[in-house]
Image: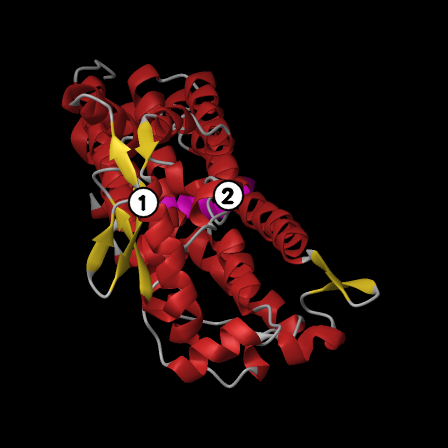
Amino acid sequence: MKKIITGYIYRMFRSFEIWALIALLILASSYLFIMRMNVTYNFGNGQFSLFDEEMKQYRFESLDISDEAVYKYEIETISYKEFDVLANQQNYAQDEVRSLFAVLGSLVIIPAALMAIFIPMFFGRLFSDGTIKNLIACGYSNRQIYMSAFVLTWVIDVLLIAIEVGLYALICLCYRWHPPVYLPAISAMVLLQILMLLTISTVCLAVLFASAKKIAPLVAGFVLVALIFIPISAIPVEILWESTNMNNDSFAELASKMKEDRNRVNMRFDLKDFDIDFTYEGEDLLLYEDTLSPAVKTGILAWTYLDPFMLAHPDIIYVQPYLFYRDGLIAVYSVTNVFWTILSSSVGLVVFKKKELS
């Protein structure tokens, strides 16, 4: 398998596709990142970007608080000194976190679209020019040929996301922006982007090797890219949320506790309800009462959690990235993407092994 991968890499660096892929990635991602970062805010008598010099004194770097405190603000109890800075002083630290994760949550978009084109063009040529038949004639098995392509695809996916992360860091340096960086949450989000990209690449590769046609993986790839923008899981989530009855007494108690001491009112994400709950000194404040039957609720949750691109939707991940990291939502969707990667690659391998290509 090592010799096959070496041969793939040799062909890849001699072809124009990989260089076009990297060039398009840098150009398109730079444009997307800058567009995502150039959000203006009403401030004083005008509108300013978060990165304008006039806003520097209100950004995280000027607040003399920890990165961790910005992420945990209103989610976990933090020191009252840091809480007071975030609560009482006009600042945009929370907007900086949202801006950061707006970009991190979109790392997969450009590489996914490019891989949907690259895989049919590069690996599709293995079928059209007879390379697959030659490899089989040399004694290599269908499994070795397929798994070599899978490994190389995985390496390319990691490389593309790494280039995007480096590019984004460079743009931040150019803007002279030092955002709040909480590495555990950021690392988990970057890993999820890699796994989402691997899901799309694996499906494209599986469809290509199963069909031996370039057009099939191209269509499959762009359908998956479209699903990043079309929140199909919004339907079950909406059903889930609309099926709950508001507990007015709990809401009144929550409002009272927040007024008394907001820093001690914590948030948690309830995976079994796909909803955000509040606690006060460890005690749950039950805001909603469920009305769905257990069977229906299980089906809806299964639909929600089987969507590999759920956290790529901007209305979801920007809400509370630290909360989603801490309470396991990012981990759940990482497992979802691993599941789809294993399933699609297994199906593709089984179909390809049955093909007579000699």
Q: Image check: 243 left or right of 37?
A: left
Q: Image check: 302 left or right of 153?
A: left
Q: Secondary structure at mark 1?
A: helix
| Quarter of the image that includes the N terminus | top left
Question: Is residue 84 covered in magenta?
Answer: no
Q: What amino acid is labelled 1 in the image?
A: Asp
Tell me which residue sits at (25%, 16%) in the image. 357
Q: Main secondary structure of the magenta part?
A: helix
Question: Is residue 9 covered in magenta?
Answer: yes
Residue 182, label in figure: none
Which residue is labeled 1 in the image? 249
Which residues, given as a range, are shown in magenta? Answer: 5-16
Which residue is labeled 2 in the image? 314
Nearer to us in this view, 183 or 168:
183
First of labels 1, 2 by sequence position: 1
Residue 122 lies, in percent from the top left, at 45, 33
Residue 159 lies, in percent from the top left, at 41, 54
Nearer to us in this view, 256 or 102:
256
Q: What amino acid is labelled 2 in the image?
A: Pro
User: Residue 247 lies in what quarter of the image?
Assistant: top left
Tell me which residue sits at (74%, 76%) in the image. 53
